[in-house]
Image (tube, grey):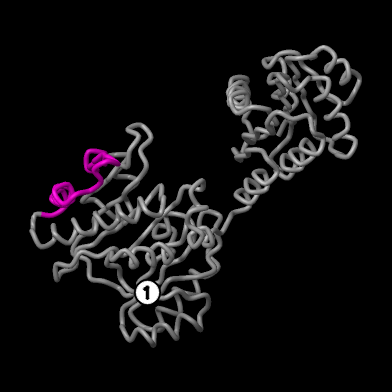
Amino acid sequence: MKIHEYQAKEIFVHYGIPVNSGYLCHNMEDVIKTYEKMDRPLVVVKAQVLSGGRGKAGGVKLAKDEIELRKHTSNILGMNIKDYIVDRVLVAQAEDIAAEYYVSYVVDRSTKSTLLMLSKAGGVDIEEVARDTPEKIHKIPISPFVGVPDYLAREAAFLLFDDMAQVKQTAAILQKLYKLFVETDASLAEINPLILTPEGKVIAIDAKMTFDDNALYRHPKIAALFEPTEEEKKEQFAKGKGFSYVNLGGEIGCMVNGAGLAMATMDMIKLYGGNPANFLDIGGSSNPNKVIEAMKLLLSDKNVKVVLINIFGGITRCDDVANGLLEAFRLINTHIPIVIRLTGTNEKEGRALLSGTKFHVAETMGEATKKAVELIPAP
């Protein structure tokens, strides 16, 4: 789960991490009132969307007076940034910047630990730095049994600064950020940029956080900040119905029983030149209602041109699955081609029940996926 910058900064402040002060605004009137209240000539207006790349998209602007502030706010509110429409802005205190740095904690599955990443090349081009000059990014695995003690925090801070006063400030920020990361069950806690002011202060002027969805039940206040996208709403719907769904953007909608079989099905689709529209594991059930809900989910995706149903009958018998499918599709009216592959217990009986119907029935997974790809309408 992602949250906005202003929400992440509120969490940072709670943990004692220094940030530049700012105020959330939803319209021009709020922005002007905030500007008058701040009583500072130079402020920054920042689009608040659940996406990176705001600066390059024109969603972050400096304003030196009310005229510029009105102009930038007018341009930013309503802006489309990576399919997110800006409906709020953060008006923040502008800071003099002597240098910009990058700091983050992420979950590193390869080392099964938290990874601390730091770079002197912070700012809007950090993605290019990671791609073109990865040696500029320092990576330090953090043992969950040790955490970030004083010596390690100082060692990491020395990778960014030589001055001891700045090292001490940064070491404290690194320890607080790690504490925040662990205690909130975050999967990412990022400061980009962490800045050095001409006066020698180290401040976080941006904040980005994402959280482990499976741990949100432990953090009701954070869970309350969730603003689901349309795709995330579908995932929530699927979870509520007892199956797992992830949108993948392709044209072949997949309905499969079992996560492993679902992964293999998507691989086969790619092998035959198609693109899976989703991962959808409905679990082991022949319940017609479950099939109906799963089909509603698949058909709500306008990219889906073909549906592939791949069922392995273990404890669940294939003839029961076939009867469930027939009953379900009496209630579902669709012109989208549907390919069904049944294998396992009573598979012959199941295929016999589907014979002569509008379904395209296949015996093997290869046959089914190849047929599904062939049935994709020409552009």
Identify the residue shown where x is 70% and y is 43%.
241
Left or right position of 211 against 141:
right
Asked whether 137 falls inside the magenta stretch, the response is yes
User: What is the total number of numbered labels drawn onto the structure image?
Assistant: 1
- Camera-nearest residue between 69 and 275: 275
Q: What amino acid is labelled 1 in the image?
A: Gly
Q: Secondary structure at mark 1?
A: strand
Q: Residue at x 64, y 27 (%)?
A: 258
Residue toward you, 168 or 246 = 168
Q: Is residue 313 left or right of residue 332?
A: left
Q: Return the x and y of residue 366 as percentages of the image width and height.
A: 67, 15
Which residue sits at x=35%, y=38%? Answer: 108
Please tell me whether residue 209 is drawn above or below residue 284 in the rendered image: below
The question of residue 101 being in magenta is answered with no
Bounds of the magenta span? 133-161
Residue 200, percent from left and from top: 14, 67
Query: What residue did someone put label 1 on?
Result: 22
Q: Position of residue 296 (x, y in %)?
A: 76, 42
